[in-house]
Image (cartoon, coloured by chain):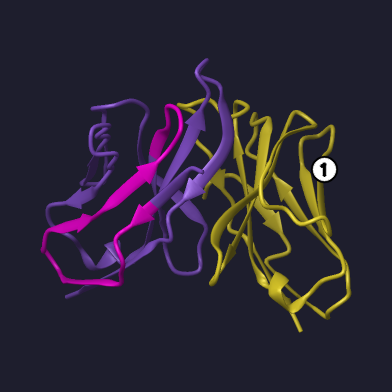
Amino acid sequence: GDSVTQMEGPVTLSEEAFLTINCTYTATGYPSLFWYVQYPGEGLQLLLKATKADDKGSNKGFEATYRKETTSFHLEKGSVQVSDSAVYFCALILANAGGTSYGKLTFGQGTILTVHP
Amino acid sequence: DSGVTQTPKHLITATGQRVTLRCSPRSGDLSVYWYQQSLDQGLQFLIQYYNGEERAKGNILERFSAQQFPDLHSELNLSSLELGDSALYFCASSVDPGGLADTQYFGPGTRLTVL
């Protein structure tokens, strides 16, 4: 079945460090890929998305590129801040050949990021 | 604020009981999704409704049921509750029935504790 695998966490960084959170997927079909972020005590917020191969999603300094050849969607940020401390989820939505999604988001297990001053 | 509201925020109940979780989607959104977040299972898709009709079904137990009403709000009913049902239940909404470019907006969640 369809699945998303994220790098094992937690990840602890100092402020202004470079961030990479790895995400790979397995899907039968043509998925769209997403990164969601969950701040403590809150719901999930969409961080960025990419709907086809080689698309780059970006938001708030975060970037991720949809790599079909490596089935990956790694999240990167050049300089993290304390306020980026949260749980990050990689997810996919699968579409059938006609392009109509089934609507179900499949999530990775989440990666806890802690940034220290 | 995503525009998706969920009530109640917290719910504490006993095993064997039945509870109802409520979700109001963003204005204009026709699709509602329910997800369960637990420590052992992670985030799991339960069910989706689009404009009042069930659209997709995931790992939803037979003890659980949902519906979407004409005003587009949705309710998730959990019955014969077990300790393992303790989790955070999220509702999300989107405009379309789940297109590739469609974005799901999540509510703040309802934390269910079964004692």
**Left or right of B9, for residue A65:** left
Chain identifier of the purple chain: A
Q: Residue at x 64, y 31 (%)?
A: B29
Q: Residue at x 76, y 57 (%)?
A: B61
Q: Chain of mark 1?
A: B
**Placement of A13 over or under B68, stated as above or below:** below
Residue B113 placed where, x, y %? 71, 77
Which quadrant would residue A52 be assigned to in this image?
Answer: top left
**Placement of A98 over or under B96, stated as above or below:** above
State the residue position of label 1. Answer: B67
Which quadrant would residue A58 be assigned to in this image?
Answer: top left
In which quadrant is the C terminus of chain B drawn? bottom right
Any magenta on residue A28?
Answer: yes
Any magenta on residue A9?
Answer: yes
Magenta segment boundaries in residue numbering: A5-33
Circle 1 Cα neighbour tier, 10 Å, few/some/many (<14 / 14–19 / ≥20) = some
A84 or A20, nearer to the observer = A20
Q: Residue at x 82, y 51 (%)?
A: B65
Residue A84 placed where, x, y %? 28, 62
Label 1 secondary element: strand
